Amino acid sequence: MKNLIIISALTITAFSFAACNNTNKSTAANSETDTAKKPMTTQPKIVAKASESVKGLVENYLQLKNALAKDNSNDAATAGKALAEGFSKFDQATLSAAQKKSFTDIADDAHEMSEHIGESAGKLPHQREHFDMLSKDMVDLVKLLGAGQPLFVDHCPMYNQNKGADWLSETKEIKNPYLGTKMPTCGSVKEELK
């Protein structure tokens, strides 16, 4: 009886190995067929296209931030207009359904804030109010889709009657866009985004 149980167990084990090997061969064959049907270059192009679009938005945002840090309202307006245009032209085709929904929520607000900044040349305090809201959206955008470069989330504790505000920066060095040339180094690095 013991011999029969051992032989049965060995037989089942042998069939299991054979089935696993056939499944692996079948899966490998299907993978080769799928790879032949779908060129490998499709996915990297999609990723590159999305990251280039985000990179353009981030570049315009950083120009805006740097203009505000220098108290240059006209350059801030120019960068705000460019950023609003970038949001309008952003190609969402490469985003997943979940990313599209989140992007749309972010982009609607960010586009509006960018437009206000662009239309408010000569009104530095007003531009900074909208920059505060825009910065929240841009941090969310970078966390959602990446930026193609390391960025820092900086924090100014004194802005808005000590309520504070965050912004994105390309360097660890603090260049405060909220207080500008009055207190250019006020703030600290809150987080690094890679």
Image (cartoon, helix red, strand yellow):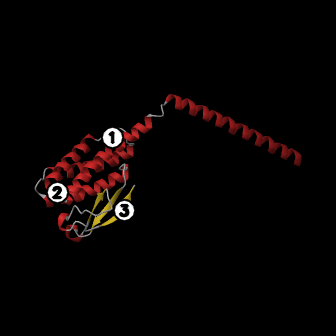
The label number, if any, that marks residue 92 in the structure image: 1
Assign a secondary structure to mark 3. strand
Disc 2 residue type?
A: Gln
Task: Give the crowd class for mark 1: few <14, some 14-19, many >=20 residues within 10 Å.
Answer: some
In the picture, measured across the screen, residue 188 lies left or right of residue 180, that is: right
Q: Earlier in the sequence, mark 1 or mark 2?
A: 1
- Residue at image mark 3: 191
Disc 3 residue type?
A: Glu
Disc 1 residue type?
A: Gln
Please tell me which residue is depicted at 35% across the width and 38% down the height of the picture: 93
Please tell me which residue is depicted at 61% across the width and 31% down the height of the picture: 29
Task: Give the crowd class for mark 2: few <14, some 14-19, many >=20 residues within 10 Å.
Answer: many
Task: Give the crowd class for mark 3: few <14, some 14-19, many >=20 residues within 10 Å.
Answer: few
Q: Earlier in the sequence, mark 3 or mark 2?
A: 2
Against 41, residue 81 (above or below) is below
Do the numbered discs 3 and 1 sit on residues whose CB atoms are within 8 Å? no
